Image (tube, grey):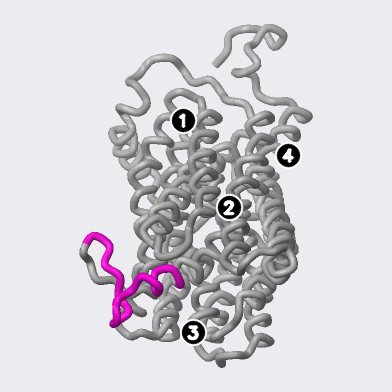
Amino acid sequence: MSTGTAGTADPAERPPGDAERRREQRGWYFYDFACSVYSTSVLTVFLGPYLTSIAKAAADAEGFVHPLGIPVRAGSLFAYAVSASVLVAVIVMPLAGAAADRTGRKKPLLAAAAYVGATATACMFFLDGQRYLLGAFLLIVANASISVSMVLYNAYLPQIAAPEERDAVSSRGWAFGYTSGALVLVLNLVLYTGHDSFGLSESDAVRICLASAGVWWGAFTLVPLRRLRDRRVPPGGEGAVGSGWRQLIATLRDMRRHPLTLSFLLAYLVYNDGIQTVISQASLYGSEELGLDQTTLITAVLLVQVLAVAGALGMGRLARVYGAKRTILASLVVWTLILAAAYLLPADAPVFFYSLAAAIGLVLGGSQALSRSLFSHLVPRGKEAEYFSAYEMSDRGLSWLGPLVFGLGYQLTGSYRDAILSLVIFFALGSLLLARVPVRAAVAAAGNPVPDRI
């Protein structure tokens, strides 16, 4: 705590005024605007079907590729790579969270993670022929990098938003992300459908769409790096990186003093695993199981992006009336119904697929944004990056089980329809666990003011 007067306090130590806080919030929104293009254009739309086609081109007569001598069905490679990227992120995220809290320098770490991921994504331009190992490697690097960057990005939320405005600020961040995702998907759609008129092959168009997401990610990351500011922490202690794992152990021990926060994290881990698997495997399911073409998949995901903006903002308003917990629980019921409908969806039926995409859009952004803002109320002051590191492990870092189960389901049965059925349990169990968390008591136990409606 500064002992100087308000006029002489170091700007890095002073609480931000209203104007400065609003400026930081606007800058913070733009990291969602920057990196969400990776999640939509790369992870959700193009890379799954494209990497699968490359793997199939390299497969043997039985349809298997053999990375490191391990027989893997070509259609499972993408799901396995997503799971591997998550495991890499689990190793790195605690180091990043501990370093941020010990040094107070989240911004350089955010820049490093963002630009490693953006570079890996831009390098996807070089995927062609039978380079499935390169594709899997770049996916692992990019996906792990975005997970690490989100630890640092989310840790800013309690510092730039008062408790009563976090639901709205978090929802606006998601809305910015879905807006950019929709905008870039429109450009992708123009390029992909008109690739002949641009003198490009279909493969060239896909590779340009993949690489342009990395360029977009890197370019718009400059906005939050200019507007966000680091907060000083008291001097002393061990080197941040060297103590990363010791800090994680200390964080987990500290979280044992907040069992209700842990209970929320467990619930979030379960239902978010289902959400992340749906996001990453949707295009693969649509192309391989339902026989839909790439144009249909792009327009369906574009519909998700457009409706997710309204969904994120609309669920933010519902949370102000009914509370974040009840609104999230309602969204999980909708997710369960969506998966049941997806299992029954007939092949070669774009209209039904669009209806499903519309339902996903209405609950996707809101369920994630409200989970983030609800967790921010459960974090003890001064431990934001540490606790959000644990949160990010639940958000991206421990969401390896769903893709792994999905990949194994296809590996064993050869049917994506059978694989998707297993995801219902994630939403059902997650709902049950969340319903048992007394969130008002959890906020009070963390030492934070309890909002009138939560």
Q: Which residue is mark 3?
A: 289
Question: Which quadrant is the N terminus positioned in?
Answer: top right
- Quadrant for residue 311, please give it: bottom right
Bin the neighbour count of mark 2 within 10 Å (Cα to Cα): few under 14, some 14-19, many 20 and up. many
Mark 3 and 4 residues: CB-CB less than 8 Å, in contact? Answer: no
Q: Can you name the residue that lies furthest to the left here?
A: 69
The label nearer to you, 2 versus 4, is: 2
Instruction: Using the image as rendered, state which of residue 75 and residue 23 is in the foreground.
Output: 75
Q: CA distance from mark 4 to mark 1?
A: 21 Å
Mark 4 and 1 residues: CB-CB less than 8 Å, in contact? Answer: no
Q: CA distance from mark 3 to mark 4?
A: 41 Å
Query: For the residue labelled by badge 3, is the local secondary structure a helix, a strand or a loop?
Result: helix
Label located before the other in sequence (3 or 1): 1
The label nearer to you, 2 versus 3, is: 2
Numbered mark located on residue 211 in the image: 2
Bin the neighbour count of mark 4 within 10 Å (Cα to Cα): few under 14, some 14-19, many 20 and up. some
Query: For the residue labelled by badge 2, is the local secondary structure a helix, a strand or a loop?
Result: helix
Residue drawn at 67 percent across, 82 percent down: 355
Numbered mark located on residue 100 in the image: 1
Mark 3 and 1 residues: CB-CB less than 8 Å, in contact? Answer: no
Reply yes or no: does residue 61 show up in magenta: yes
Q: CA distance from mark 2 to mark 3?
A: 27 Å
Residue drawn at 39 percent across, 53 percent down: 137
Bin the neighbour count of mark 3 within 10 Å (Cα to Cα): few under 14, some 14-19, many 20 and up. some
Query: For the residue labelled by badge 1, is the local secondary structure a helix, a strand or a loop?
Result: helix
Query: For the residue labelled by badge 4, is the local secondary structure a helix, a strand or a loop?
Result: helix
Q: Which residue is mark 4?
A: 26
Q: CA distance from mark 2 to mark 4?
A: 26 Å
The magenta span reads: 53-68
Amino acid at the residue labelled 4: Arg
Q: Position of residue 454 (x, y in %)?
A: 62, 55
